[in-house]
Image (tube, grey):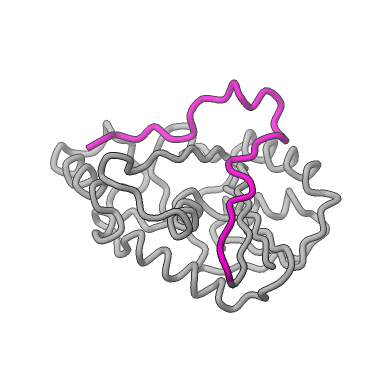
Amino acid sequence: MLEIWWVRHGTTDWNTEKRWQGHTDMPLNDNGRRLAMLLAERLKDIPFDECWSSDLRRSAETAQLALPERQIRLDARLREIPMGHLEGKTWNEISPDLQQQVADWWKDPYTLPFPGGAESLADVTARVKAWQSERPKEGRIIVFTHGGVIRCCLWDMLGMPTAEHNWTTELGNTGIVRIRYSDECMVLVGFNDLSHIPNSWDLPPAQNLPKG
């Protein structure tokens, strides 16, 4: 049996400001580095057979701080979905036309590419599954990546969201999602585990998402 620990990266300034990041290569901010070091204490005694990260800086920095003694392998297939002209913008900074495009995308994110981007969530799922197909079928792997990637992994297991429940998973920065994979099934072992963060229940929502 294979168990993958999917870990969302630590906080960046753009996370704090609610800006779309996509492929923009933002570093962690001071709080993001703090969260990664708290995560290090949680992970220090857990044996991982492989350690991977998106090649974007916010994920790679989180991985290096959380597992300072381990070799971290980088792969561009673990990147966030590209967000085109919206990268670096907040909801209130984009035009009404772009707001409507995002609202329309939200209704069918698996088929439609993100406005101004090149991929749908189906495309993201395909490249992450291609990465996973090259991994061993046994053991424990940790992957430092992005909220969109982790949601795609969850939806691949649980089924695509409906129009009525299109984005209803909360993923905090450095939150852990554990999934077990076997020939018979996939099992969600843990979701958005933030137990390494003191008073994590007091954190604000990780996403502030406009509804279309």
In front: 211, or 157? 157
Residue 170 on image: x %, y % = 48, 37
Residue 33 on image: x %, y % = 67, 40
Figure quadrant of residue 30: top right
- State yes or no: residue 200 in magenta: yes
Total marks placed: 0
Q: Is residue 206 depicted above or below 138 in this figure?
A: above
Q: Which residue occupies the extreme right position in the image?
A: 45
In front: 32, or 114? 114
Image point (77%, 54%), residue name = 67
Image point (66%, 74%), residue name = 137
Q: In the visual, does 81 lie left or right of 108?
A: right
Q: Main secondary structure of the magenta part?
A: loop
Q: Which quadrant, please, contains the C terminus?
A: top left
Q: Which quadrant, please, contains the N terminus?
A: bottom right
Residue 203 on image: x %, y % = 57, 25
Image point (54%, 58%), residue name = 56
Q: Which residues are magenta?
A: 184-212
Q: Is residue 135 depicted above or below 58 in this figure?
A: below
Q: In the visual, does 47 lie left or right of 99?
A: right
Figure quadrant of residue 17: top left
- State yes or no: residue 123 in magenta: no
